Amino acid sequence: MNAPALIVRRPSVCPHDCPSACALDVEVIDNSRIGRVHGASDQTYTAGVVCAKVARYAERIHHKDRLLRPLKRVGPKGSGQFAPISWDDALDIVAENFLRCERDFGAESVWPYHYAGTMGLVMRDGLRRLTHAKRYSGFFSTICINTAWPGFTAGTGKLTGPDPREMAKADCVVIWGTNAVATQVNVMTHAMKARKERGAKIVVVDIYRNDTMKQADLALCLKPGTDGALACAAMHVLFRDNLADHDYLQRYTDAPDELEAHLKTRDPQWASAITGLEPAEIEAFAHLVGERKRTYFRLGYGFSRQRNGAANMHAATCIAAVTGAWRYEGGGAFHNNGGIYHWRKTLIEGLDVVDPNVRVLDQSRIGAVLCGEKEALCGRGPVKALLVQSTNPATVAPSQEKVRRGFARDDLFVCVHEHFLTETARFADIVLPATMFLEHDDLYQGGGHSYVMFGPKAIEPAGECRSNHDLVCALAKRLGAEHPGFSMSPREIIDWTLRESGWGTLAELEEKKWLDVQPAFADAHFLNGFGFKDKRFRFKADWATTPFANIGLMGPWRDMPSLPDHWAVIEAADDEHPFRLATSPSRGFLNTSFTETPASRKREGRPTVMIHPEDAARLQIKDGDVVRLGNRRGETRLHARLFAGLRRGVLISEGVWPAAAFLDGKGINVLTGDDVVAPFGGAAFHDNRVWLRPA
Ligand SMILES: Nc1nc2c(c(=O)[nH]1)N[C@H]1C(S)=C(S)[C@@H](COP(=O)(O)OP(=O)(O)OC[C@H]3O[C@@H](n4cnc5c(=O)[nH]c(N)nc54)[C@H](O)[C@@H]3O)O[C@H]1N2
Ligand SMILES: Nc1nc2c(c(=O)[nH]1)N[C@H]1C(S)=C(S)[C@@H](COP(=O)(O)OP(=O)(O)OC[C@H]3O[C@@H](n4cnc5c(=O)[nH]c(N)nc54)[C@H](O)[C@@H]3O)O[C@H]1N2
Ligand code: SF4
Ligand SMILES: [Mo]
């Protein structure tokens, strides 16, 4: 008789690129497999809740298509034809090619390219240590945060805000430009608690009736890229109707009189023409947030993915300063808590060996970089070798046609370290199998909360998988790169990092599982002042001096408005392109992660574009028809889905599907642009003018 399976619960942390960074409680079976994944009930932000896709993580970690051995390309580039080889041989080939490129073209011809497939600090950022030690081209990671973070900190001076758990104590929660039900479910836990226990009102500001907007008491469905106008008109009403907190304005802000004068012409009528909202909706919104001082503005990434997104983010934060919401428990604006952790990343990232003369290349412009566009290469030589880790740029990066042309170059050597044979991995010369989070140790922080967390290794790696850290160290040895971090274990690096950052030791953290580092109330609410020298909130943004300013690198920051406004630089519809397309995340996938798991795949079905029934009728398109969608950057074919929860003229295509899932093998990012977005780069994924035709 077989012994019954031994099931134990192990603590962990969800490693995916999600602000919720959930504390997990994982069923481990016989020390080798996992069962169901639960949210830790004793971590106060996660509060026992995780999303459906991670609850079923067994589908991903024990997936039949998981990469288990190193592979070498044996067919043409991108053909997907590979043969297994040993780790030693694979590492030798990668090292030989990197050394060859360095010798023939200089160290800057090698570009380590990584992102947030895992958010563990050691595994995510360790590749930077190799980059710096070898003086390879640097990596400017712009794709996700570069409009949102400068936009938030332009007013506040610091990337933090009121404790997200305070949402439960708010009288109004404004969920703005985040589809939280899909992308960070824990926001809903706390917001719904406020509704249930205090009768709080939930406002949702978005561009379509998504699952989050369906929960709203006040749903503001505006035209994409017009949030700045909504914010201005709301503040106009607040001043006009004596709902501004003048005492707060005088004590805590930079230019309230100038702001008030500037807003005189920006009334609800003006904003209505821009946003498409009724003036009465704007009045109702202003009165709600003006009368309920405990209003928590939970500002997401979505509305920042517009060419005017940073300005719009800043405008939204200004409302909380006009009402003085920051003063109250449950009040204020929040986007991300990155500013509270004060990590010392010297060891992880090799910050002590950075050479400032080495060029830094923009993540979002990988297509332009690989296609040899001069200004994307900072006017210097070509990139000849790539090491791609924890990201899938062939699918997620903008201007996909360019990206794929670049990857297809025969003179480009590509190594990809992955869990699956992604569309990027298919372009590789060498593919290496990577561990998943339960197979290695790492350190995590919350973006949408305030915990430092440790995720210990819980099971042995599948097949021959090795961690990002192991790969970086093994390559460093072969490449002659020197740094103490290359001969330390992840645990040693974590312990050093915790101590140097003032968060105790690894032993202490492991015993407690997590550390709540939420700043004191007065600091989190900026009652001791905002993050600038004069301690005042800035209605007048000085884009060159926000904490995330990167004026040395790139970006049209000079063109931006200083006071909040509608900045008309979005891709407005025109005769040739009558629609505005947003490529919003889907609930079942996380970027392209989980596009391989059966339940997520089943849930999402197939790539679709949502269109208003009246627009569809005009074009004689029926639900389920194949349509062609295009602009000057490219075109693709997919199925139409009629949906009345959209404005006319707006299209939504949810999810970053593999290109192979589309009828022509062209992904949605053939339509998105890689132009440098203000102030300092990034991609305007939800800001695309397109045409649509029956196919
Ligand atoms: N299920 C799931 N979860 C995810 C992800 C995923 O792909 N799927 N991605 C993860 C990552 S990397 C990130 S950065 C976060 C992002 O998560 P969010 O912060 O939620 O940002 P987005 O999902 O890009 O967009 C949120 C909403 O903004 C809307 N939006 C687009 N343009 C505008 C606009 O101009 N104004 C307004 N008001 N709304 C607009 C979109 O339609 C969408 O409904 O989610 C993470 N979590
Ligand atoms: N059209 C459109 N495009 C978008 C977006 C959008 O909203 N619309 N969102 C953008 C945003 S916000 C982001 S952040 C980017 C995200 O883009 P990516 O960072 O590329 O995110 P994923 O597609 O999830 O790919 C992560 C990959 O890392 C792998 N991985 C995970 N953990 C590890 C690990 O420990 N080691 C290694 N070696 N590999 C690992 C996973 O298998 C997965 O293939 O996409 C952007 N692209
Ligand atoms: S909600 Fe986000 S952090 Fe939580 S389990 Fe799901 S993907 Fe992970
Ligand atoms: Mo992201």
Image (cartoon, rainbow, N blue to C red):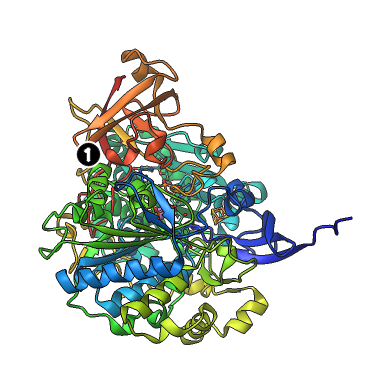
User: Ligand 4 falls in which quarter?
Assistant: bottom left
Percent across and percent down for residue 660 are: 39, 37
Percent across and percent down for residue 302 are: 39, 47
Q: Can you say whether 100 is above or below 389 in the image?
A: below
Q: Can you say whether 334 is above or below 219 in the image?
A: below
Percent across and percent down for residue 104 are: 15, 70
Q: What residue appears at the point 34 percent right and 75 percent down from the top-left corner?
A: 130
- Say which of 116 and 99 sits in front: 99
Disc 1 marks a residue whose amino acid type is Glu
Q: Is residue 509 visible?
A: yes
Percent across and percent down for residue 534 are: 29, 76
Question: Mark 1 packing: few (<14 Cα in 10 Å), some, or many (20+)?
Answer: many
| Quarter the N terminus occupies | bottom right
Farthest residue in the right direction? 1
Q: Is residue 40 visible?
A: no
Q: What residue appears at the point 23 percent right and 42 percent down from the top-left corner?
A: 570
Disc 1 target residue:
571
Q: What residue appears at the point 54 percent right and 74 percent down from the top-left corner?
A: 517
| Quarter the C terminus occupies | top left
**Taking 444 as reference, is 45 left or right?**
right
Mark 1: which secondary structure?
loop
Quarter of the figure with residue 335 = bottom left
**Taking 559 as reference, is 200 left or right?**
right
Quarter of the figure with residue 269 = top left
Mark 1 CB in 8 Å range of ligand 1? no
- Say which of 34 and 276 sits in front: 34
- Say which of 372 and 195 sits in front: 372
Tally the marks.
1
Q: Can you say whether 38 is above or below 8 in the image?
A: above
Q: What residue appears at the point 42 percent right and 75 percent down from the top-left corner?
A: 474
Q: Can you say whether 502 is above or below 236 in the image?
A: below
